[in-house]
Image: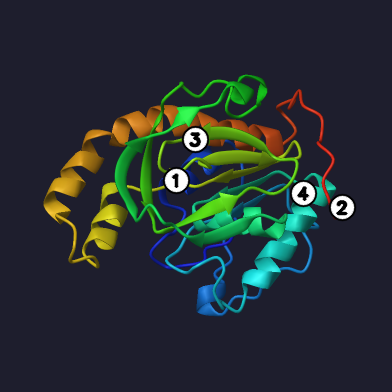
Amino acid sequence: MIENDPTDDPRRLGDWLTAGGLELHVVRPHAGDSLPETLDGYVALVVLGGEQAAYGSTPWFPAVEALLRKAVKHRVPALGVCLGGQLLARAMGGTVERSAAGPEIGPALVARRDAAESDPLFARVPFTPDVYQWHEDEITELPPGVLLLAASTRYPHQAFRVGDRAWGLQFHIECDTAMLADWAATDDEIDAEALLEACAAVLDDVEEVWRPFAERFAALALGRLDTGTRALPLLGQ
C-alpha cells in the first residue's frame, strides 16, 4: 500500500483489508521510503490519496504510475483511491486536470453504471452508494478501453476498471471522523462543524457498502474470488 500523504493514511480501509485476510505493507514515500521496483512478492497494490496534484511535480509519482502499469500488465489486483485513482488513470493514458466544476467536498452519492452489474467488486454495491468527496482535480479523460463503473452529475468519472483487476475511485472510502476533522481544520472556507456533522451521519452507511467491497478486493488478491471478467485490450501493453 502506498501512502502519498501523512494526512491520508490507510485508516478504515486498512482495517477492512486486514479483516479480509491481507497483511499490509505500507510504503510512505513522503517520509523517505523507497518504492519497490516490481510487485514481486505482493498480491495486490493499493494507492491512497493526498493533497498533491496528480499532474504536479511530486518526485515519486512517476514510480507510482510505473507500478500501476506493472499491476495492470501482470494482472496484480490494484486499487487507487482519489489521488490514487487519478494516478491510475494517468498511468494508463488518461488525463487529470483542475476541475472546472470547482471543489467537491463532503458526503455525497454516486450512481452506479449498468456496466457495474458484471463487475466482481461493484456488482453488489447499491445503485447510489454514500461516499466521501474531497478533491479539486478530476479525471477529465479516461484511458482508452476502460470500463466506467460509477458517475455523478458534476464529475462523470467516479469509478472505473482497467483490464479485469485494477480499479480507480475518485472518492474516498477510507476516512473516519478524525481524518475528516483534520482535513476540515485546514480549510477556512468551509463550515467545519456542519460538514463534520453531515459526514458523521453517513459513517455507518459508508462502512456498510465499502467494507464488503474492500473485503471482496482482498478475496480477489488472495485468489478466493473469481472475477468472472476478461481483460480488455489496452494500448501500450
Q: Is residue 1 visible?
A: no
Find out whether the residues at labels 4 and 2 contact each other: C-beta distance under 8 Å. yes
Q: Is residue 61 visible?
A: yes
Find out whether the residues at labels 1 and 4 contact each other: C-beta distance under 8 Å. no
Query: Which residue matches tag 3?
Result: 151
Q: Earlier in the sequence, mark 3 or mark 1?
A: 3
Q: Earlier in the sequence, mark 2 or mark 3?
A: 3
The tally of labels here is 4
Q: Please give left or right for residue 165 compared with residue 173 in the image.
A: right
Q: 93 or 63: which is nearer to us?
A: 93
Amino acid on which the number 3 mark rests in the picture: Ala
Amino acid on which the number 1 mark rests in the picture: Phe
Front disc: 3 or 1: 3
Query: Which residue matches tag 2?
Result: 237
Q: CA distance from mark 1 to mark 4?
A: 21 Å
Q: CA distance from mark 4 to mark 2?
A: 9 Å
